[in-house]
Structures are given as C-alpha cells and as structure tokens.
Amino acid sequence: MFRRPKNVPSANDARRAQRIAAVRRFNRFYTQRIGVLREHLLDSPFSLTGVRVLYELAHWPGRGEVPTAAVLAGRLALDEGYLSRILRGFEQRGWLRKQRSTLDRRRQSLALTERGGREFAQLEARSQQEVGALLAGLSTAEQVRLVDAMHAVSRLLGAAPDDASAPEPPYVLREPQCGDMGWVIHRHGALYAQEYGYDQRFEALVAEIAAGFMQHSDPARERCWIAERRGEVVGSVFLVRKSKAVAKLRLLLVEPRVRGLGIGRHLVAETIRFARAAGYRKLTLWTQSELDAARHLYAQAGFRRVSEHKHESFGKPLLAETWELPL
C-alpha cells in the first residue's frame, strides 16, 4: 500500500493552502484599495476603528439595547480599554454624551451630541463619495457583479442582513435593447438543454422567432418585454400577431435564480394587458406538457388548454399543448 512520505503535503493540504493564500491576497488588496491602511480614515482624526465606533453610535436608535461601552465593545469585539480611549477622544471633542443608565446606575449610556451627529454626517458623505468613485470605473453589469460577490462573501462568513424584513430589490419590465435578443436565444438554448434535455434545434427555433420579431414586428400590435433585476436581464416574453383578431404569447422565460418573485406572472399579465389594448379578441400559446411552471402561470392567468398532440421535436418525444384566452 502506498504511503505518503512524512512532511509531504497531500493534494487537499495543497489546495487548502492555496485558498488561504488567495484570501490573504484579497485582504491585502482590498484593505489598501479602500484606504484602511491610512492613519486617518476619510480625513478624520481617527483610524478605521474609531470611525466604525462613531458609525455604531450614529445608527444605534431602535436596536433595543442600552448603548453602554460594554455592549458596544461586545458588538464590535473590541478590547474595552481600547474602546474607552476612543470614546474619550469623542468626548473631548464634544461629540459624545454620557449619562447614567436608568436600568443600571453603575453603567453609563452613550449617545452622540448634535455636534457629533454633524461630524458623522460629514464622514458619511465622504465615504459615499469615495465608494462612488470606486464604482465609477465599472459598468452597471460589473457593479452588480461586485455587489453580488460582496453579498455572497457576507453570507458565507455568517453575516446577518442589516434588515431581515427588507424586501428584495425590485425588478423592471422594459423594451428590448441591443444585445437582448442574443440573450433570449442563448438563455433559452442553455436552460432548456439543462432542464429538459432539448437539443440545438430548439435554440434554432428561438433564434428564428427572435429574428422575425426584430425584422418585421409592428410596434402597435406586437411587443417584447425584458425583465431586468439589479442591472441584469432575468426574463423575457413576446406577443406577436397571428391574425387580425388573434395574438400569440411566445418565448416566456425566467431565470431560475429569480423564480418565485412574481416576474413570470407579471410578464404574462403584461402580454394580456397589451393584447386587449391592441384590439385582439383572443390570445393563444403553444407549450409542452412537461413545462409545469409555465403551464401553472397560464392557468392562473385564465388560459385554458384546448388541444394537444404528440410529436418528436428537439431530440425527444413531446406532448404539445395549445392554450387560449378569450379577451
């Protein structure tokens, strides 16, 4: 049996060492990038720790605890002696007010004075400017990727959200822009291959529909909606003319990571609203029996299945369904 020589690291040890080195390398880069290494942060008289203590005091209202030095030290994992020196500096500048706690006369509660609040507001404005300058060199998509990566780091390392009751960032439905049709074709091809095993002939069908829409659509009677969330495209749907009285709903798609936010329901509702306003008498669609989530949305919106037939398409046997909604 093979025995690894002593003092020779295993592959797992080597990979772990590489990950540790990568984290340390990122820490060195990021602390330098945001100015943490400067003696005075944001042109204030204080280091990063002092500014963070000031931030905690400014945002304390509503937390339910009495803001004493001991509580603050515990929240920030600071040595109480070190924190005491920081607080003394605030007090000497007239930024901090101490008063005996009504719950425990041995302790003093902490609060910023009006002057301290003004000083913090100025630091906050400088911080906003610095971060704004940091983001200014990035495109919207790159900014979204950066913020998402920071959220991921926070979650993985156990950070609690600032406000667990805050709603998810909103999404918008908008008209297509240059490049969106390429996204529609790519994501339909990739997702339907991954989730249902469809081959490239399905992607070809989507490309044909998208190309026809771009070349021949009538803005008064046909429409495409693109769903966008936090700067990223996450969904689509098309409404196209079949006849003077009938329109077709086509290419409904919602990215898996945002399903459950109501985006699909909103996309379907927009096609119905537009079809009615455009004067169509009926809205129809063609789908497959295995697309359960989409079929559920159609049923919720009032569509009813009117026919079905077996066929062999996209590399597999399927049961096609036609659904209709009188308008």
Image (tube, rainbow, N blue to C red):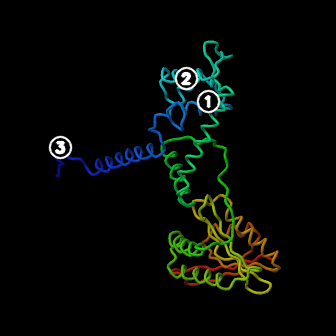
| Residue appearing at x 18%, y 48% in the figure | 4
* Disc 2: which residue: 89
How many numbered circles are shown? 3
Identify residue type, mark 1. Answer: Leu
Q: Which type of secondary structure does the marked residue at label 1 adopt?
A: helix
- Give the answer, above or below, for where 157 lies relative to 55: below
Between marks 1 and 2 in the image, the one whose residue lies nearer the viewer: 2
Q: Residue 234: image x %, image y %?
A: 60, 64
| Residue appearing at x 69%, y 65% in the figure | 173
Tell whether label 2 touches label 3 (CB within 8 Å).
no
Tell whether label 2 touches label 1 (CB within 8 Å).
no
* Disc 1: which residue: 57
- Give the answer, above or below, for where 304 lies relative to 258: below
Categorize mark 1 by other alpha carbons within 10 Å: few (<14), some (14-19), many (20+). some
Categorize mark 2 by other alpha carbons within 10 Å: few (<14), some (14-19), many (20+). some
Q: Residue 192: image x %, image y %?
A: 54, 72
* Disc 3: which residue: 6
Identify residue type, mark 2. Answer: Gly
Categorize mark 3 by other alpha carbons within 10 Å: few (<14), some (14-19), many (20+). few
Q: Residue 199: image x %, image y %?
A: 50, 78
Which of pointers 1 and 3 lies earlier in the amino acid sequence?
3
Between marks 3 and 2 in the image, the one whose residue lies nearer the viewer: 2
- Give the answer, above or below, for where 15 lies relative to 215: above
Between marks 1 and 3 in the image, the one whose residue lies nearer the viewer: 1
Q: CA distance from mark 3 to mark 2?
A: 54 Å
Which of pointers 3 and 2 lies earlier in the amino acid sequence?
3
In the foreground, 221 or 100 = 100
